Image (spheres, coloured by chain):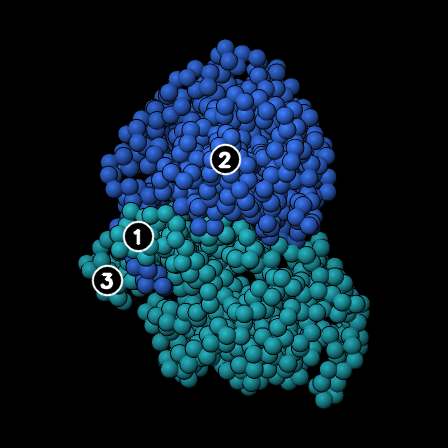
Chain colours: A cyan, B blue
């Protein structure tokens, strides 16, 4: 059951759902013509199909491991990484000044997604590097940029993010790592970091760690944190890896999945690092990296969902079992209503999550190209939805993929379970989905709901336009959007943030539901109301969109009933 | 973080939600006084806490394996099994004539659930034996009963179910295993069976396989299948294990979870077996076993959910991270709204699933005690809901348990992931949850909806009675029940079963949602509207019950839109 890169899907979404054309019309991205985009996606897709996908099981069966302090990666991962680096797939959206392709984030998002479908654990490596490139482009000094960016862009060196400490997870401000000025422009960084994805590898010449630590005059909390670049090998005067830095991999975690990605405990013992951005302003620099990483992690969820979907569909098209009441079907279990219900749900949900992620990427590109703050606000608003709904879709779809396989789904050889085990962490890292939901209802509504209302205005304008030709699809979308608007108003009116937080997860999911109705409607309109996408839209709008009402009842219930229950009531 | 048997929970549900008293009032179960039940639950609970729970990780870390054709079980499982057998916990509801306690299925269901919380993979062994005892009690000859039942009841021997073959999973009728008359009252059984849970072990003297196979004159399909009892060792004239039968374990599966339970491929090469029930009537005998096994598997889901809930709650009560806006809280992550939302959801859902399972068990007991067909119809109607909703609750709650743990949830040492990996199969075996949903909307509505309407009448009668004192809880339950009633009417009106099947899974889930509203309302009424259970009821009815509307929209959408999508539209 080979993986097939869904290039036509991305093209359809670019053309008819998220309007990539407006990005291409800007000076900044004028080179990203449809022909160019198609060529990029096709070439990257081929690499994913032929080089990365065959590695996926290797990572699971032969996890990365530590051998005398050295990380040994899974069989074939070194070659897979080389194919990614040499294809330029790490740096599609990186600045051409340092060797990047300078293409839109929308294109990079699609390529990242394909790599996730093919081999999630390996894809996480370049995803981390992409974030580091982004952070250095925005916040590093010219000297640092010149040494590091060409190496990171080419993939000769890899990048990591070092935020978490045992006592400082979601609460980054509680970190204890320290940095002291060496007096020579460098700093000595000391501390222990945990959950460092790809903390080391055996296929790049260097590994560059972005580490959050506190300077002696840094205040407690997030406002006293600075960001440092701490390389495994300190570059010599020619910019080549020189002497080993004072850092080490203490251990690797034994995880539920994603075995091909070494998750390290990193120890920094006065390691030499360089300040990135301003002193005590590390969180801002980190967020540059993290916002795009959040979109990227959403893409990991979507890519895994696509892989799990193709895998389950292939099984359903082969497996014969029982007789379905349907004549002229495939003669396989796909004829059974409940199997078809699962697969259609999987496909419809992937369309939603993918459209949200690409709409977010387009907003990022428009902000980059035009500097327009409205696009920035839209990107900021859509990011937590893209992350949380994308990863939930990865989890839900791969879980359904197991179910489609029946008994075979529980047997590891089948591969269905690995999709689920691998993707499970994406709802946790880069800010748990709970954190995403809190971000959405607090920070992202600090504009009084403007970004949200602008989206709803667009959704309703399209639904109104679609009413005459496709009333059965347009009307429910319009109604749902109105219900959502009331929920936004309710949220904005709550001065006590905890009233918002209690319904945040449901609010986020409801918002994704309505965006899904909007995007499916866009597809149906583009198709003229008949054809496969219109049929899928009808399925989604009839069967899945109605979930929004229950979700919004939950979203606007407030916090009082939740806190009425004491810890003792819960069993403490 | 030890497991604590929730004995008080069962007692509350027995007393105030499912009315066990009416069972105790029957002659058949008059010995099951509240004192007796409390004593049983407490003693079984202690065994689960002290003996079984410490074994849970052993099974995961040291899976059962095959050594020169012999199954070696996980460390400590032999002692754990002995404690179960010696406590009499295999045969709580078995007939006293052969050594069983003869207590209600409701009590057995609670004990099974506790054993599932403590060590799911080991609990599966006695669960299979219980099903076999049930099948033999109803369908075996007196001679067979005399030899086998005392040994199965005491736990000296274990029982298994052998249905599935590679080409015959959900479609049991496609099986190819054969049986031929030996002319001496025994039969020669030949064939290969897969997915045989606890196909062998190294701690019982014998393993007795109930095997479905076809006699030479058996017609194709399910109507030509007979059931045979095929022991690993053929009992000698004294009823002791004698010569080895012609059967073997070919291999064990490498599974996503439940590693402590050996899942075998069994080969029967003219193995000696005895007919159970009538020729060609094996499916009926098997269903006796399977219906109670389905309730038992639902209990596995609920037990796992309870274990995962306690585990996550303990973590949330310890882990400090960030500051919550709530004053006077625990000072831990339990103060955060989204964490509390998850834990409260987990607890509320467990209450629902557990009440459904125990209501089903009470209906079985009433049928057993009174022979009243209405109770039989209720048990039959609730069984697929208990199985599917119980196991989905196991999956959803353990998945949330991972999320509550944050990054720790993805690390195997934590134990949160094991709950999920172990319970995942329960939605698949004993009839996938898709099969349960089809059973509910087809076979269980063949009475024109009578069993369903009787339940809805009860739900609405209680809601009407509750309206004056607890209108905020009673009114939404009444409304939801009315909406469900319309959906039942819609289902019953569909002559084309596939129209029902397309919405079956959502219908089943919606039914569980409304039953949940009803049972939470019962709890609140019993408590007088204030107290922990009333607060939990308020949470459930406000936040989770509203899901039913979206589910029922899906349930009654029919099949046409689903089949409008061709396999090519789905990507074939």
Q: Residues at marks 2 and 1, common chain?
A: yes
Q: Which marked residue is nearer to the observer: mark 3 or mark 1?
A: 1
Q: Secondary structure at mark 2?
A: loop
- Which mark is drawn over residue A397? none
The residue most toward the front is B183
Would you say the residues marked 3 and 2 are in contact, meaning their CB atoms lie under 8 Å apart?
Answer: no
The residue most toward the left is A468
Q: Residue at x 64, y 19 (%)?
A: B39
How dense is the environment of label 1, judged by Cα within 10 Å: few (below 14), some, or many (20 and up)?
Answer: many
- Which mark is drawn over residue A530? 3
Is B415 rendered above or below residue B522? below
Left or right of A537 in this view: B150: right
Q: CA distance from mark 3 to mark 1?
A: 14 Å
Q: Residue at x 40, y 34 (%)?
A: B280
Q: Secondary structure at mark 3?
A: loop
Q: Earlier in the sequence, mark 2 or mark 1?
A: 2
Q: CA distance from mark 3 to mark 2?
A: 63 Å
- Which mark is drawn over residue B182? 2
Q: Which residue is mark 1?
A: B562
Residue B418 at x, y percent in the picture: 62, 47
Q: Chain of mark 1?
A: B
The residue most toward the bottom is A238
**Residue B60 visible to an observer of this rendering:** no
Q: Residues at marks 3 and 1, common chain?
A: no
Q: Chain of mark 2?
A: B
Q: Chain of mark 3?
A: A
């Amino acid at each position: 059951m080979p993986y097939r890169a869904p290039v036509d899907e991305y093209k359809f979404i670019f053309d008819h759902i998220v309007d990539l054309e407006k990005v291409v019309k800007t000076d900044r991205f004028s080179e990203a013509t449809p022909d160019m985009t198609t060529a990029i996606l096709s070439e990257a897709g081929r690499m994913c199909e032929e080089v990365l996908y065959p590695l996926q099981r290797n990572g699971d069966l032969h996890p990365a491991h530590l051998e005398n302090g050295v990380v040994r990666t899974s069989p074939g991962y070194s070659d897979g990484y080389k194919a990614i680096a040499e294809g330029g797939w790490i740096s599609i959206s990186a600045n051409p000044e340092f060797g990047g392709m300078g293409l839109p984030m929308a294109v990079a998002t699609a390529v990242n997604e394909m790599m996730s479908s093919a081999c999630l654990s390996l894809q996480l490596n370049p995803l981390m590097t992409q974030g580091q490139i982004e952070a250095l482009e925005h916040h590093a000094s010219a000297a640092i940029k010149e040494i590091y960016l060409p190496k990171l862009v080419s993939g000769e060196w890899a990048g990591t993010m070092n935020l978490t400490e045992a006592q400082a997870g979601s609460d980054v401000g509680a970190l204890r790592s320290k940095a002291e000025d060496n007096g020579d422009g460098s700093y000595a960084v000391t501390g222990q970091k945990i959950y460092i994805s790809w903390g080391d590898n055996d296929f790049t010449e260097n590994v560059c760690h972005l580490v959050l630590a506190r300077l002696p005059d840094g205040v407690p909390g997030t406002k006293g944190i600075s960001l440092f670049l701490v390389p495994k090998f300190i570059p010599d005067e020619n910019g080549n890896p020189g002497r080993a830095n004072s850092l080490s991999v203490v251990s690797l975690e034994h995880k539920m999945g994603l075995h091909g990605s070494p998750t390290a405990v990193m120890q920094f013992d006065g390691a030499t690092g360089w300040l990135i951005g301003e002193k005590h302003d590390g969180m801002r620099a980190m967020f540059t990296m993290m916002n795009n990483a959040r979109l990227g992690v959403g893409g990991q969820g979507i890519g895994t969902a696509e892989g799990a979907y193709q895998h389950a569909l292939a099984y359903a098209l082969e497996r014969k079992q029982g007789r379905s009441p349907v004549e002229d079907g495939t003669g396989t279990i796909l004829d059974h209503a409940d199997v078809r219900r699962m697969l259609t749900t999987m496909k419809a949900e992937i369309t939603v999550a993918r459209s949200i992620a690409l709409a977010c990427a387009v907003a990022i590109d428009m902000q980059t190209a035009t500097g327009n703050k409205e696009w920035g606000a839209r990107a900021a608003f859509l990011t937590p939805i893209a992350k949380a709904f994308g990863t939930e879709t990865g989890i839900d779809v791969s879980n359904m993929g197991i179910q489609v396989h029946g008994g075979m789904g529980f047997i590891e050889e089948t591969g269905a379970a690995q999709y689920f085990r691998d993707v499970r962490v994406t709802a946790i890292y880069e800010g748990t989905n709970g954190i995403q939901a809190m971000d959405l209802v607090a920070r992202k509504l600090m504009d009084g709901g403007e970004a949200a209302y602008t989206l709803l205005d667009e959704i309703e304008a399209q639904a109104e336009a679609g009413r005459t030709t496709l009333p059965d699809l347009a009307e429910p979308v319009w109604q749902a959007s109105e219900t959502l608007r009331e929920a936004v108003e309710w949220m904005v009116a709550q001065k006590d943030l905890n009233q918002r937080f209690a319904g945040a997860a449901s609010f986020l999911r409801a918002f994704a539901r309505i965006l899904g109705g909007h995007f499916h409607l866009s597809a149906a309109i583009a198709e003229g109301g008949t054809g496969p996408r219109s049929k899928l839209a009808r399925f989604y709008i009839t069967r899945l969109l109605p979930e929004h009402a229950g979700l919004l009842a939950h979203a606007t219930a407030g916090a009082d009933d939740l806190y009425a229950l004491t810890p003792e009531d819960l069993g403490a």
